[in-house]
Image: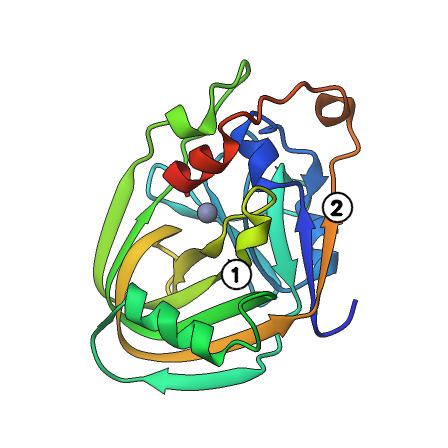
Amino acid sequence: MGKHSLYQYGTIGSLMAGAMDGTGTIQEFLTHGDFGIGTMDGVDGELIVLDQEAYKASATGEVIKLGPLEKLPYGAIAFFNPDHTFTLKETLANEVVETKVIEAMKSKNLFAGVKISGVFDTMHVRAMPKQTPPYIRFSEVEQPEFTAHNIKGTLVGFYSPVLFHGTSVAGFHVHFISDDRTFGGHVLDYHVEDVKVEVQDYSELIQDFPKEDVFLEAEFDYSNIAEEISISE
Ligand SMILES: [Zn+2]
């Protein structure tokens, strides 16, 4: 694993179609990086990996530190070493920030990591409630939303090229965790206030898969998968 590799375990498409059982362990996942996102067994909450520590932002609104043997169905992770860094010291909406990140990236046709740390004027997130088998479609799950104002924390996530909508989410898929580790989730929208933006280019994607029969023997319905990902993510 070099500086420019992104490792993905499972795919968003399979997750959406019901591959929600945790299969890989946090311990194994963390051997592939120190910075990442994902979800836990039964799509239980939003996984945030920051500085090699794994946290789960739950649908209850709590943030919990994860142990090594807890399992995930999906995640993306990398060893974060920024290639581009800039600061923003004014109130800007996420659409504007995203445009600046895309300008900083080496190419829209490569994956990129984005880390935004500092003060956010607003942060609007949601978190998946844990599901139990038989799983319904991810897009049918109602997800609680939370908003914080004037909050210090870190946004963690990845940009995927349009071509990969299916294995991941085209464009930005980012999660957030506050500095005091009490607020977090899957980011819906935000305004930055005073932040450092760091961007890493990846020239390599390593795609790994669950090895268990629950995945290998499953019949997935991918007929509306692109639309389901767009609605849900
Ligand atoms: Zn997410």
Label 2 element class:
strand
Q: Residue at x 57, y 33 (%)?
A: 15
In the picture provided, is 87 more to the left or to the right than 13? left
Label 1 element class:
strand
Among the two numbered marks 1 and 2 on one chain, the one whose residue lies closer to the N terminus: 1
Q: Is residue 201 above or below residue 180?
A: below
Residue wearing tag 2: 208
Residue wearing tag 1: 158
In the picture provided, is 69 more to the left or to the right than 150? right
In the picture provided, is 7 more to the left or to the right than 56? right
At which x and y percent is residue 38?
Answer: 55, 47
Amino acid type of the residue tagged 2 in the rendering: Asp
Amino acid type of the residue tagged 1 in the rendering: Phe
- Please identify the quadrant where the C terminus is shown: top left
At which x and y percent is residue 136?
Answer: 47, 19
At which x and y percent is residue 120?
Answer: 27, 69
Foreground residue among 119 and 168: 168
Q: Is residue 30 above or below residue 89?
A: above
Any atom of ligand 1 within 8 Å of the CB at mark 2?
A: no
Tell me where residue 89 sits by quadrant.
bottom left
